[in-house]
Amino acid sequence: MRRSRSGRRCAARSCSSTARRARASASPRASTSSPHSFPLFRPHRSPTVTSTAIPFSQALREGTWSDHSDSEGAGFMEGIMRGTATREDYVALVVQHFYMYEALEAVAADLAQDPAVHPFLNEALIRMPALERDLEFLVGADWREQITAVPATEAYAARIREVGAEGWAAGFVAHHYTRYLGDLSGGQMIARRVAKQHEFAGTGAEFYDFSSLGDLAEFKTGYRAELDALGAGLNDDERARAIDEVRAAYRFNTEVFIDLARAKAAAAA
């Protein structure tokens, strides 16, 4: 994945808008059901949310806000954000991030040449090396043998891979947006809390360090501009389908937090 300055549209933008739209809007097959899979649905929405009359970044934010709030409000995550969670709680979250980003960044590499995906990819976003260093610090040299994914994380990663296998660009961007924009926003508050609470000096919370991106507010502005450019090539139904995928991503996150809380309770019993 190439490194680009925040907000700069890559050369791939010169690709025809027809090709970009076709790849971005390709519809995935229905997800296979599992206890932690969420069927993609298209509920009735106000035209103000899905209409091409408003920027796609705005439509994503407004169309998924309640799901985002539900995810942040999950009990396990509240403890992390308030600084009341244990070190073990934080480590459990880092472990789940490893499996999520393993899937997300593998799919990003697979779709890197897609003109609808390429503008969102930036080497400074890649999290896997930082996660590996964090886990070695937090768990030990044998961390790979020590960690496991909770069922909801397995389902979440499977969904990301399914979207990638279908080549559904807008669906992949939905997951990319949910994860990375969250890391660059609320994730920065989490980083400060856990670093202070657990006295981390860099390693341990390196996952949240995006200093190589430069000004994060500027980068996010550029990212939203790329979302708007992508959305300009989608019709209302295609935009609604992508918004539903963001909502599904938030619900997967909520289920991950529920599974983590359940595992914590079981360990304490």
Image: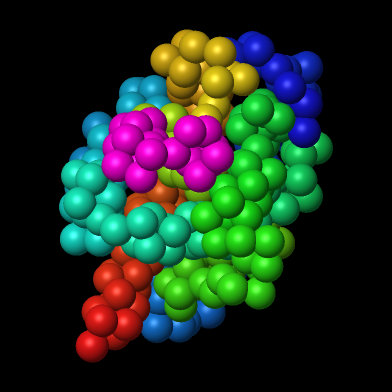
Where does residue 19 sit, x and y in percent of width and height? 73, 35
Residue found at x 55% / y 20%: 211
Q: Quadrant of residue 252?
A: bottom left
Q: Nearer the viewer, residue 209 or 103?
A: 209
Answer with left or right where residue 108 lies relative to residue 192.
right
| Residue drawn where x is 23% and y is 88% of the image | 269
Q: 104 above or below 149?
A: above
Q: Position of residue 20 (x, y in %)?
A: 69, 34
Q: Count the marks: how many? A: 0
Give the residue at x 48% y 33%: 201
Residue 248 within the magenta-colored segment of the rendering: no
Whether residue 264 is visible, yes or no, is: yes
Q: Is residue 231 left or right of residue 196?
A: right
Identify the image quadrant of the N terminus. top right
150 in relation to 121, above or below = below
User: What residue is at 68 percent from the left and 61 percent from the top?
Assistant: 141
Q: Is residue 70 visible?
A: no
- Residue 74 sits above or below residue 108 on the image: below
Q: Position of residue 182 (x, y in %)?
A: 40, 38
> Is 258 placed left or right of 187 in the picture?
left
Given residues 135 and 75, the one toward you in this image is 135
Query: Which residues, given as a range, are shown in magenta?
Result: 188-207
